[in-house]
Amino acid sequence: MLMKWKWIIIGLACALLTSGCSLTQPPQTYMRLPKLLAEEERLMEQIQLNLPPEAAIIRPRKSNQMNTVPILDLNGDGNEEAVMFYKDKGNKDKIVGQVWSRALDGWKMADTIQGEGNELDTLKFVDLMGNGRLSILVGYSSLSSKDQKGLTIYSMGNEGQLQKQLESSYQELIIDDLDGDGKKDMTVITHERGRDKDIAWATLYQYDRTLAERGKTSLDPYVNGYYNVLSGQVSANKRAVILEAGIGAHSSKTQLLVWDAGQLKTIFPERDNPTFRAYSALSMDVDQDGIVEIPKMIAPPGYEEAAMVEIPWILQFYKWDGGTGLSFVLERYTENNRGFYINIPQDWYGRYTLERTEHSLRFLSMPDRSLLAEIRYIPVELWRDDEDGAWIELTRTANTVYIINQAAASSGMEFFHLVTETVGQEEDFLL
């Protein structure tokens, strides 16, 4: 029996020596992950000890960090800092921020931030100065007024103290490089409502010894707000901030902000904006060429007298033409509730309409209304393979099988797409 156990022990030792967890690896290999976790635990212990009795750590609505308490090197000295915010329920829900610095003997509080409002809207960390130091962008909002928000930007000095770089009202905040000089710039969208008049503008800031205003332009003050804000290429040599705003009860339009000839400019006129739509839709790169296209909407033939909510709206995507106009790219029909979209074949343009039922979508030729294609969506548990071959399976998800009539199957494989195949497509059509 002793001999048996001896060989078992030798075998286990050999296995360990030849495995990824080799006993010959240096001791620090085993210490890295536990050490990191221990540091974070000590940080949270210190934070909790310093919180007021009725305080609760909060997360921002928008951030470029995943952690509730981000840990970063703010001033580029090789030593990490941690930033956290809490709401003090014992002091009228006051928001307070704390910056902690890691020292040899643990985490020490370096500075505090006295917040505004009662909601933490934005917390971002960006190298605006281009020197490896991260600025802290903090945005606050109020429950009573979502439009009136306040932005404060801080940098951390060599001694660990925060220095205020900028204070501004804002509604949206976009970090990009609109002027293409290789340095980050910041576009701040501001929208203020008043008794006498509403005002709105966009301001572009860039760091040059200080964070300074480089350009400013007015915006339409009568929009409801911006439901989609992004930046990207809008032509081969021009980037833009893309603003998509709600108008009235359900309509929308898009505006482009570009840097041109040393100025921040809007592209489309406010009164006769060519992007006006019946409902909200999202700009995106629909043809995957690296340039963002802008959607418009049309009703198919036969729906001229239908209520707006009953119309199967067709999205037409356009590229900016470099002036104040648009250049057509493609047509698309989206069924977000059913999880798919159709890139309309070019030979259908101008001669088709749609019919929808609970479980099918039919494309009909105009004016004779002959069938071009029919797509059906069937619960997985109800689907049985079609032995006659009249229907061809396009694809399926965990819950649904999508099929198409056999005559249109070859083209259907090309134009049919699940919304999950395209980034951003899930909310392409916001009815």
Image (cartoon, grey):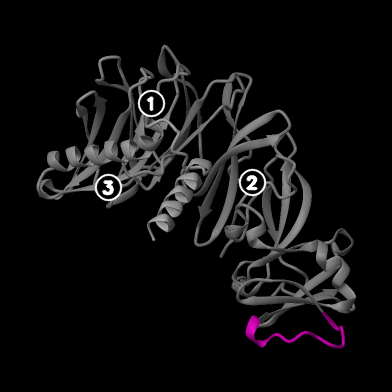
Q: Which residue is mark 3?
A: 58
For label 1, the residue is 135
Q: Nearer the viewer, residue 31 or 243?
A: 31
- Regarding mark 1 in the picture, which secondary structure is present there? strand
Which quadrant of the rendered structure holds the N terminus?
bottom left
Identified at 31% across, 49% down, the residue is 145
109 on left or right of 90 = right
Task: Identify the residue under disc 2.
Answer: 272
State the image coordinates of residue 73 (x, y, percent, origin top left): 37, 25
Q: Quadrant of residue 163?
A: top left
The image shows residue 308, relative to residue 86, as above or below, that is below
Answer whether residue 332 is magenta in the image. Answer: no
Q: Which residues are magenta?
A: 380-391
For the residues bearing labels 2 and 1, Cβ distance under 8 angstroms: no
Q: Secondary structure at mark 3?
A: strand
Residue 310: where, in percent of width, then height? 63, 75
The answer to whether residue 135 is above or below residue 228 is above
State the residue in front, 397 or 33: 33
* Main secondary structure along the magenta-highlighted residues: loop
Report the amino acid beneath label 3. Ile
Front of the two marks 3 and 2: 3
- Residue drawn at x 51%, y 42% as measured from the top left: 20
Q: Quadrant of the C terminus?
A: bottom right
Comes first in the chain, label 3 or label 2: 3
Residue 391 horizontal/vertical position (percent): 82, 81
